[in-house]
Image: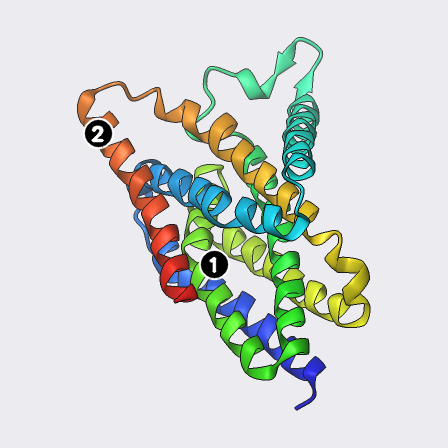
Amino acid sequence: MSVLSWIIVASLFGGALSVLCAALFALNARTHWIGMLVSYAIGALLGAVFLDILPEAIDLAGNTAAVSGTVLAGILLFFTLEKVLIWRHCHHDHCEAHEPHEQPGHDHGRSGTMLIIGDTFHNFVDGIIIAAAFMVDINLGIVTALAIIAHEIPQEVGDFLILLHSGYSKLRAFQLNLISSFATLAGGVLAYYALQGMQSWTPYILALSAASMIYVAVADLIPGLHKRTQMRDTVQQVALIMLGVATVGLTGYFAGA
């Protein structure tokens, strides 16, 4: 096969496989598990950001200040975007976002919207990385694609759980994650034709992806955990957050070994 064919197959297979593997777990979880497993999702998101995405962005950019500034700008951007989404549900003095009868754990899809945007950026960059590896060597490309698949699965599990927590149906959550995975193909094909021009943007696309995930975890999800104040709940939440971080860390370690 040609290099472009390898890139297309690896991008489609990698994106779809990670979503399907994650769906086997997340979409079969019982409804009453979702609130508890959001803690795991927070750990997976933060683990992916601080153990993988930001170190890679800083390494590629070679300029810590520029990457940090992009993350800061991204957090402000997503704060503004969430405000716009909230305003969309508000009419004069009546605001659905603050109704007392709103179901716990549902936020009219705002967390899910933030996550899909960030995940699409991340998948797009994955495509660029896959293309770059295949253009160096076919075997390196295969190994890189497999490593990305292995690393994406725990993050995709977190994505599914957050979408369900945000009020999406199981089918809609699967559709959104699958559609987002196609960004890997777009990034791979575009990188094949314009790799040099796209490489300079890669660390900043990664930084924006990190900003989205940080914002979702810290601004949208963690506050909900504080509503459960019993010691047992707190211990459970901390343990699951640590498990999410550990899953991402161990996956990255064994994939890179």
Give the amino acid at mark 1.
Glu
Q: Residue at x 36, y 44 (%)?
A: 245
Q: Is residue 110 above or below residue 163?
A: above
> Foreground residue, 209 or 198?
198
Q: CA distance from mark 1 to mark 2?
A: 27 Å
Residue that badge 1 annotates: 152
Note whether 153 is above or below 43 in the view shown.
below
Instruction: Tell me the amino acid under the disc marked 2.
Output: Val
Name the outermost residue toward the front.
Answer: 62
* Residue 82 image-quadrant placement: top right
Determine the image quadrant of residue 182: bottom right
Q: Residues within 10 Å of mark 1 (few under 14, many from 20)?
A: many
Secondary element under disc 1, as helix, strand or loop, is: helix
In this picture the colour scheme is rainbow
Q: Earlier in the sequence, mark 1 or mark 2?
A: 1
**Which x, y percent locates residue 49?**
50, 43
Residue at image position (23%, 27%) is 233
Among the 4 quarters of the image, the one containing residue 253: bottom left
Please state the horizontal and vertical placement of residue 66, each as a whole percent of the image.
70, 37
Q: Which residue is mark 2?
A: 235
Q: Is residue 22 left or right of residue 63?
A: left
User: Residue 250 — which label?
Assistant: none
Quadrant where the image shows the N terminus: bottom right
Q: From the viewer's perspective, is residue 113 above or below residue 171?
A: above
- Residue 211 picture location, percent across and down: 60, 37
- The quarter in which the C terminus is drawn is bottom left
Determine whether, in the image, residue 5 is placed left or right of residue 161. right
